[in-house]
Image (tube, rainbow, N blue to C red):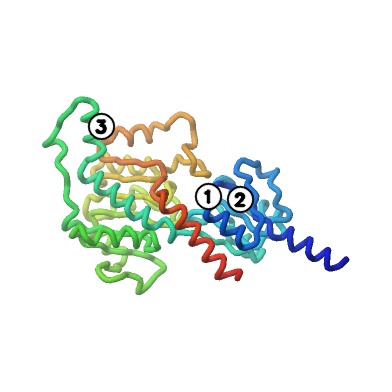
Amino acid sequence: MRGEFLDFNAAVLKKVVCLDSTDPLLESGLTERGYCVEHHYATALQDLPLHDAVGVVVRSRIPINADFLVRAPHLSWIMRFGSGLENIDLQAAEARGITCIAAPEGNATAVGEHTVGLLLGLRHRIAWSHREIEQGLWLRSENKGDELENQTVAVVGYGPMGDAFAQRLCGFGCRVLAYDKYKTGYAPKGIEAVDWATVEREATVVSLHLPLTSETRGLVTSEWISRFAHPFTLLNTSRGAIAPTSVLLRGLERGELLGVGLDVLDFEKTSLTGLETDAWPADLQALLANPRALLTPHVAGWSHQSFPKMAQVLLAKHDLRFS
C-alpha cells in the first residue's frame, strides 16, 4: 500500500504545464525525460492545473509571480522559451527553491543578424526607398546611403545577443566597442571593452542588448542622449521599455539621433503579442512616418532555426541541473 502511494505521487509530480506553444523538439525532449506534458496555451490563470506540476514552460503570456507560485506547491523548475526572465518573479522563485532557465544562446544568432539588418536598412534607406518606389517615386540622390566602414559601434550589454551582433560587425571595417557594467575580461579579439565615458565620447552607433530590470527601465532619456559627443544611430532589440518612443522622437527631431532601428516598443503588451491599445498611439504613427526610423514587430529572435536551438539549450540546461 505504501509503495503504491509513493508511485502515485512520483507520477503526479512529473507533470509539466506548457503555458505557450514552443517547439516540438522541446516537448518531445521533455517526454523522453519522463515528463507528462500538458498544453494549456489559452487556459486562464485561475483554471491552470498547477497543484501537481513539477515544471512550467512559458514564453510571455502569463506573468509568473508569487501568487502563481503559491498555486504550484510542487514546482521544481520554470523554463522560459526565450531570452529574458523579466516576466518571472525570480526572488519568489528562489525563495521556493525553483530553478529558472532561459535560452538566450538559442536565438542569439537570429538577434545578431536581425540587428545588423536594421542597421544596414537604416544607413542605406532600404525600406524607405522601397516604400517610395511603391508610390511611383524613383529618388536616387535623396536615398544615398551611409557606409558602416570607419563607424564606431557601441554594443551595450555583452551577453549572447550583444556578442552575436558584435561578431557580425567585424567584417564591415567598423570599430566595435563593448560596454557591460557587470563584466570584466569578456571582450573577444577584435572587440574593445571600454568604459561608459568612451561610449559617450566616441560612438556613432549604439545598440542596446540589455535585460529589462528596474535599473534599465526608462534608461534612455533625453538627457542620456544629449550626453553623447556625436549624433548617433540607436538600435534596440532588447525591450521597448528601455527606450521610450517619445524620447526617441525628440532625439530625432533635435538631430541628436541620426536614426532608430527598433524591434521592440514600449507600447507592447506584457505578453509581447501586440500593442497595448487597438488604436496606434500618435508617437508610434509619427515614428512610422519618419524616414530615419525602421521598425520590426519583435521578431529579431524568431527564425526557423532559433526555435529548435532554444529547445536544445533548455533541455541541456535542464539536464545539467536535474540529471
Secondary element type, mark 2? strand
* Whole-number angstrom distance, CA of label 3 to CA of label 1: 34 Å
Position of residue 49 in the picture relative to residue 293 (left or right)? right
Residue extending furthest left?
Answer: 141
- Amino acid type assigned to the residue bearing label 1 in the image: Thr
Residue on which disc 3 sits? 131
Residue on which disc 1 sits? 22
Position of residue 65 in the picture relative to residue 2 (left or right)? left
Q: Nearer the viewer, mark 3 or mark 1?
A: 1
For the question of whether residue 242 can be seen, the reply is: no
Q: Which of pointers 3 and 1 lies earlier in the amino acid sequence?
A: 1
Q: Badge 2: how crowded within 10 Å, few (<14), some, or many (20+)?
A: many
Q: Residue at x 30, y 70 (%)?
A: 188
Q: Badge 1: how crowded within 10 Å, few (<14), some, or many (20+)?
A: many
Identify the mark at residue 224; answer none if there is no mark: none
Residue on which disc 2 sits? 18
- Expressed as whole percent of the image width and height from the top left, the position of residue 83 reads 47, 56
Number of numbered discs: 3
Which corner quadrant holds the C terminus? bottom right
User: Residue 14 appears in which quarter of the rendering?
Assistant: bottom right
Q: Residue at x 17, y 47 (%)?
A: 146
* Whole-number angstrom distance, CA of label 2 to CA of label 3: 41 Å
Contact check, label 1 and label 2, Cβ < 8 Å = yes
Q: Badge 3: how crowded within 10 Å, few (<14), some, or many (20+)?
A: few
- Amino acid type assigned to the residue bearing label 3 in the image: Arg
